[in-house]
Image (cartoon, grey):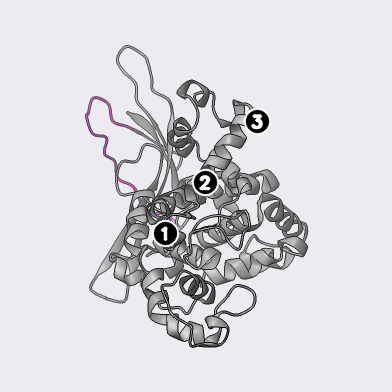
Amino acid sequence: IEGTYDGASFNCDGTDTCKFEIPSTDEDGAKVEFWAFSSYGDSSLIYSAMVRVQKVDEGDPDQLYWYADVISTQWTGEAVATCSGAWKVFPPIGGAPTWLTTPKLSEELSSDIPYTYLAANLIQQGVVDASSCADGGLAPGGGANQCGLELARPAVTEWQNQFDDLILTTAEQTSVPARLLKNLFARESQFWPGNYQGMDDAGLGQLTEDGADTTLFWNSSFYEQFCPFVLSEETCGNGYIHIQEEERLQLRRALVGSVNATCENCPLRIDLPQANYSVGVFAHTMIANCEQTGQVIENYTGQIAGEVASYENLWKFTLVNYNAGGGCLAEALTYTLGSELELTWENVSPFLVGACSGAVDYVNDISQ
């Protein structure tokens, strides 16, 4: 095994384990390239990694802490945060901001927010008796009035926390931050996993056909798992981009249908097992949006995403991509770069205007 670390060569001839001393790095880390070769003269591919090693004083003068992070397709240790690999960027030293974290216990995800849309659905499905309220506890526009909301508060609190265990498990399996997922579901659907007022958006994260297209195109591993449930393995083997448009349409509609828990014959008209299944779908959808966001930034800057934006800002740009689409993100990036500004949320968000403007409150809400 041999390679280079931050431009310096190393060689570990004849050993099963290659060890060499590495100095501490700056916050951006150092690049490693490595490969294996044999006495027969053949060689492996050249692999690369980003390595960050930093010594940090966390307030105890008698104790210094070492933080070591690795981004590489070959890394088999504890994974860094999801999407770091796509963006080639490390999360902040010592951990990400709270909204991009996953707690140890699902109880730490618990919330008691008085969601009026959720309350209205629980009233309409008979979970809450609001007959003593004016208009049966319902307000114009699809929400609950104040009386209905007060009566529904216990049921609303119980309902919004029933997915916490599954969100935590999904976050641990995919490395998509649990708090991000919960905030996303809160903003999109208030945890009511059906169609929103008869619109085409479906499920806890309100997936559309365009959103499904992003998932299937940009998350190839998810496509490979999902496609055989809908199409033949032979067809799926051609890849999403190479199958016929009618087959792609069939896949997109099937994916939207898989997260839509509306069920006329189920209790409360909601298929809860299907809602539970959808949590994983939305995590993989978020990973797909990470990938697309990284590519959009690379297309418009000519640089890898992690070279021009921070970890937290890249997540905010990903939420723009999820909510408003890659076109809105690209337009805002174009104006930001044209104004010779750095790619931060504070600089990019003012350029989200017109049909894209709703993404500003969307991102600010989820990231708080």
Residue at left offset 52%, top offset 46%: 257
Point out which mark residue 33 bears: none
Q: Which residue is labeled 1 in the image?
A: 177
First of labels 1, 3 by sequence position: 1
Residue 199 vertical placement versus 133 (above, below):
above
Badge 2 element: helix
Measure how far apart labels 2 and 3 are at the Cα level: 18 Å
Point out which mark residue 245 bears: 3
Q: Determine the residue located farthest toward the top in the rendered image.
A: 40
In the rendered structure, which segment of residues is drawn in magenta? Answer: 11-25
Q: Position of residue 23 (x, y in %)?
A: 35, 51
In the image shown, does 265 or 138 lie closer to the viewer?
A: 265
In the image shown, does 111 or 68 lie closer to the viewer?
A: 111
- Given the image, on which type of amino acid does mark 1 rest? Pro
Q: Position of residue 143 (x, y in %)?
A: 57, 76
The image quarter in which residue 179 lies:
bottom left
Residue 31 vertical placement versus 205 (above, below):
above
In the image shown, does 232 or 360 lie closer to the viewer?
A: 232
> Mark 2 Cα within 10 Å, few/some/many (few <14, many 20+)?
some
Q: Position of residue 82 (x, y in %)?
A: 43, 51
Q: Which residue is labeled 2 in the image?
A: 257
Relative placement, left or right, of 322 versus 101 is right
In the image shown, does 358 or 4 lie closer to the viewer?
A: 358
> Mark 3 Cα within 10 Å, few/some/many (few <14, many 20+)?
few
Badge 1 element: loop
Badge 3 element: helix
Q: Position of residue 216 (x, y in %)?
A: 54, 39
Determine whether label 2 and label 1 are within 8 Å by CB: no
